[in-house]
Image: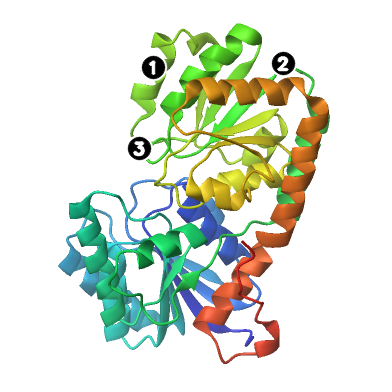
Amino acid sequence: MTARLHLMHVVRGLGAGGTEMTCLRLAQHWQSEFRQHIVALGPETRALEPAFRQLANSELTVAAGRPLNHIAMFWRLRQIVRDKSPDALIIHVFGIPHLVAAAAARSAGVKSLAVKAGNPPPLKKALRRKWAAVVLGSQLLRCPIASCSVVVDKELRKLGVGMPKNSRALPNGIDIASLAARASRSRRARSDQTPVIGMVARLDAIKDHDTLLQAFGLVRSRIPDCRLWIVGDGALRGALEAKAHAYGIADSTKFLGDCADIPELLGQMDVYAFSTTRDEGFGIALVEAMAAGVAVVASDVPACREVLRDGEGGILVPPENAGELARAIVDVLQNTAARENKIAAATARVEREYTIAKCALSWEALLFPNAESGRVPDLQCAY
């Protein structure tokens, strides 16, 4: 791959969500390979701004200091793209904003671009029609859709309007060695052996923290000294904190907000409980927990089923079922041999499927299909 091709990323903001973290990991991986320019559409949250600014051979621009309508954002992005002349563009936000960004890039002369789709379309017919219109818009703009999982790719195709040429499933990846090392150091330094159950995720409606809170109340009736850590922030934080009080678990539940030391926190957990909905697209924090050597219990929804390979890498439980979730968590905490077997299987799966190197190579194959074909990975999905 040519060392100094210019790659631009467009993200919604600089918060610590899964989409922004994926963008950051790719940008970190490509520091020595590309010149990069990260464009944040807005400044609402800046948790990851220091990390983006530390990147070598990179530039960061916040496109607008206040919310702009779509027309104003089009002209602002077009100006940025024309000034910087990137060779390729990755859009890390799906929907009307990605159509605006793709249109701005095409009008400014960018020949190679793609958008990341992080969630499946909703079930409601009216919303599905809107998603179908977005997919059609992507076709018109010749903007391939790189879905974060096979599940999302299949669900988008079910909209029945076709997909842009070269669209494909392109799973996320992480820096496994770094994350595992940090988690291991934290685990070795751990002095308090009180059982810790944790979940790392944005506090919004796509996840299902409420079922986890209910389940934790049931777990405490069996293991009274256990604790629950909720890592992440979002619009539902106040409501979830109120529910923790209502369920009588507030004294042993910590809402930690957005944290930069996720690997260290994972190293202190005994169970990673990923309670989510069918609208989940991938769950990057689920993969992080697997790489960190934490036993996983997750909702049996399509995305989790794919990542855990039908339960090979963790225990799947029916969604929105606090009793089954609690039962599985207790089983994991009390059965050391079974827990270690699941951790070993999860670690092997992550190393096989979800490395940042494999993810990056897949992006390069999509954006620069004619460059050094020897570096292009086998893109056939292993599910």
The quadrant of the picture occupied by the C terminus is bottom right
Of pointers 3 and 2, the one earlier in the residue sequence: 2
Which residue is label 3 attached to?
A: 205
- Given residues 253 and 55, the one toward you in this image is 253
Q: Mark 2 or mark 1: name the one nearer the start of the chain.
A: 2
Which sits in the foreground, 33 or 234? 234
Rendered view: 238 above or below 88: above
- Say if mark 2 contacts mark 1, CB within 8 Å: no
Q: In the image, 344: left or right of 38?
A: right
* N-terminal label among 1 and 3: 3
Residue at which label 1 appears: 243
Disc 2 versus disc 1: distance between alpha carbons?
23 Å
Q: Is residue 43 above or below residue 235?
A: below
Residue 111 appears in which quarter of the rendering? bottom left
Q: Position of residue 354 (x, y in %)?
A: 65, 59
Residue 54 in view: no
Q: Nearer the viewer, residue 318 or 98?
A: 318
- Residue 185 placement (x, y as % from top left): 80, 38
Residue 163, position as x, y percentages in the image = 35, 75
| Label 1: which secondary element | helix
Is residue 170 left or right of 291 when viewed as pictured? left
Which residue is drawn at the image coordinates 55% and 24% (left, top)? Answer: 324
Please give the name of the residue rendered at 48% of the width and 21% of the height, measured from the top-left corner. 213
Secondary-structure class at tag 3: loop
Q: Residues within 10 Å of mark 2 (few under 14, many from 20)?
A: some
Which amino acid is tagged 3?
Ala
Q: Residue at x 65, y 63 (%)?
A: 356
Calculate the distance from the C-alpha at mark 1 to the C-alpha at mark 3: 15 Å
Q: Is residue 138 above or below residue 286?
A: below
Q: Position of residue 210 (x, y in %)?
A: 42, 25
